[in-house]
Image (cartoon, helix red, strand yellow):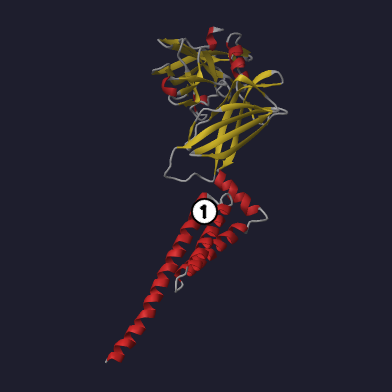
Amino acid sequence: MAAAATSPWQPNEHGAVRLIAAEAALASGGTPTSLRLGVQFRTAPGWHVYWKNPGDAGFPPRVDLLAPPELVGKEPPAEIEFPAPRRFSLPGGLFAIGYEGEIVYPLKPRPYSAPAGVRNVRIEADVDYLTCAVDCVPYRYRLALDLAVGGTAVDDSGTAPLLDRAEASLPRRDGTLSGVAVRADLARSAPSLALGVEIQGVEASPAADLFVEPQELFEIGRPAALRIPGGVRFELPLVPRRTDLPLPKSFPLAFTAVGLVAGGAPIALEARRQLGTPDSVAEAESSGAPGKWLPILLAALAAGLTATAMALWGKEPASLGRGLLGFVALGLVVVCLFLLVGRVTSSGLAGIELALLGLGLVLCLRRRRASRKAVRPDSTINRGEGR
């Protein structure tokens, strides 16, 4: 019965893989069973397989259930669960995120009822994965195991503990640990952004690390783990993948912290946050603050000072005093722009600066046009008197 809960190992030059089930026998009579399956890997020394975000290269395993039909119809591919991973350093300053040695990826349990009258059930799965050291090699296998159908469900003494340990190593979800709190924020760190994740109620072991789940907005740098009173703070750079498109004002980001200790026990913790870019946060804060009209007043004052400087410089006859006063007015425009930094978005500040330049150009052109009109009537009168 122990062998029935596993498929045969599929060995290759870089390791081996098999399908396992926690049950040696399923209940008969249509009794629903929460079927626990997993994919077990053994990697050769120096080789690894991948977490949901592989790092700088690679891809995580993919599992498609092929049989029995009652399981295949439940949203294939099978949903893989990922134990707490580790980071692997690669040549060229690259890194990978995953596992080495022996690892079991649990599949999310699925309700299953063996059809009436059957004596055994064959479970088949297609497993597609990549294993890497310096080089990477893809493999794909069709795995199958046969489970007996009896009066009651029976756990397998060899595979059930494997799945128990794998499920115990899954990261705990944010909010499920008493006394543990997670806070995440984004800050501007030229030329990129910096993600800060602060976890209170834990201690950081030497292996503390933070991994961001797959997303399309950023290239993720390596984090720094900083011990703080009552917890740990991770800081890591986020470099936008696209510089030709603006970032959305808010976006979801999921991450997993490993190498933590809570209540004397090692844990990993996963969380998901809806984050706002620093510009959008500043905009929201300024719009909700008592001084929300201050940016408008500063922009209007800058426009008035620009007009004053242009009037002083354009007044005839020219004088040193008016010229100096024009420069003072222009200096006050710069002060207004400085005060606007942090109160409006970077794109809003650029718009105000362009508007002031446009205002100065319009006033200059109007002054020149007025001067030309003032000259034309005098020259006409002079020509008439000569005749």
Q: Position of residue 341 (x, y in %)?
A: 56, 50
Label 1: which residue?
349
Q: Residues within 10 Å of mark 1 (few under 14, many from 20)?
A: some
Residue 131 appears at what percent x and percent y? 43, 17
Q: Nearer the viewer, residue 49 or 330?
A: 330
Give above or below for 383 relative to 66: below
Q: How many marks?
A: 1
Left or right of 180: which side holds 16?
left
Horizontal and vertical percent position of residue 354: 46, 58
Residue beneath the point at 36% across and 80% down: 375
On the image, the x and y values in percent for residue 175 come to: 68, 31
Which residue is more in the foreground, 304 or 52?
Answer: 304
Res. 148 image quadrant: top right
Q: Judging from the image, what secondary structure is the residue with disc 1 in?
A: helix
Instruction: State the residue in front, 294 or 4.
Output: 294
Quarter of the figure with residue 83? top right
Give whichever of 14, 368 is nearer the camera.
368
**Residue occupying the point 44% across, 37% down:** 241
Quadrant location, the N terminus: top right
The amino acid beneath tag 1 is: Leu
Instruction: Looking at this view, name the residue that lies furthest to the left.
Output: 387
Quadrant, the C terminus: bottom left
- Residue 307 in view here: no
Q: Is residue 47 visible?
A: yes
For image coordinates 63% across by 49% down, the residue present is 285
299 over 342 or under it: above or below: below
Query: Which residue is outermost to the front?
Result: 320
Instruction: Answer left or right for 89 relative to 113.
Output: left
